[in-house]
Image (cartoon, grey):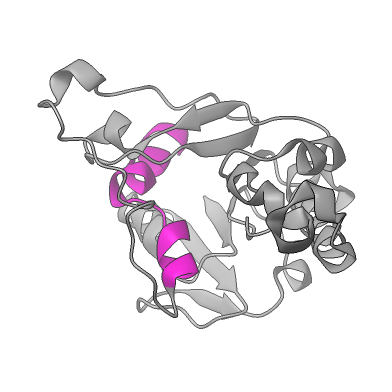
Amino acid sequence: MNILVACECSGVVRDALIARGHNAISCDLKPTQAPGPHLQCDVRLVLYKPWDAMIAHPVCRYLTNAGVKWLYRDGRRENGPDPERWRLMREGAEFFRMFDSGPEVQHIPLRAVENPIMHEYAAAIVGRRADQFVHPWWFGSPFQKATGFHLTGLEPLPMERTKASYAKGEIKQAVWLMGPSNDREEKRSRTDLQVARAIAQYWF
């Protein structure tokens, strides 16, 4: 299958798909961090191509429920809305909606658009909530990180492991505990290897 991995520079999902024998290509404004097929450009320039499937990872910075307070000045609702933050949120939500239901992707029969839990304002623009939330620990990676998927033509990923199959305290909140750095956001958004494997195995 010809699969576009949109908004990915890590190559994690792309390489998991290639390992399954697919013609997967990642696309991002940034260069790829791992050698492999990669288009460094605005993904909207290549959406029209005859893709069989697409996995998209649009930036969640302005959409996530964890950061909803920053829609207001100094993170305090009583200070009133931050107009620039609201503008960026609307742009981000419209970008996400393009991948999920826009006319640009209607020719791609199999689609999954990934993001953390959205706040209500972004979800209202997108038009619906995620079809499924998974955690890396479902697939053998002992970390907790709620990852939502808006699905078209794909079934929800099946859970491989239950919490009961882990030792007490084994499952960690690695993302929340990540220390500050210049590439912290990029590291936080990186797809877990076992989640990428599950995407490749069960969807394609």
For the residue pair 114 and 81, the one nearer the viewer reads as 81
Q: State whether residue 157 is above or below residue 39.
A: above
The quadrant in which residue 125 appears is: top right
109 relative position to 163: left or right: right
The front one of 13 and 57 is 57
Q: Which is nearer the eye, 196 or 167? A: 167
| Magenta-drawn stretch, dominant element (helix, strand or loop) | helix
Residue 119 location in percent, x, y? 70, 39
Relative horizontal placement of residue 4, taking residue 99 as reference (left or right): left
Determine whether 163 is above or below 23 in the image.
above
Q: Position of residue 40 (x, y in %)?
A: 59, 81
Q: Measuring 34% from the left and 51% from the top, which residue is drawn there?
A: 192
Report x, y in % for residue 203: 47, 35
Q: Is residue 192 magenta?
A: yes
Query: Which range is magenta?
Result: 184-204
For the question of whether residue 63 can be seen, the reply is: no
Q: Is residue 80 left or right of residue 193?
A: right
Q: Which quadrant, please, contains the C terminus?
A: top left
Q: Residue at x 39, y 78 (%)?
A: 33
Image quadrant where residue 118 sits: top right
Residue 103 on the magenta segment = no
Q: Is residue 134 above or below residue 55?
A: above
Q: Is residue 20 left or right of residue 26?
A: left
Q: Residue at x 55, y 54 (%)?
A: 3
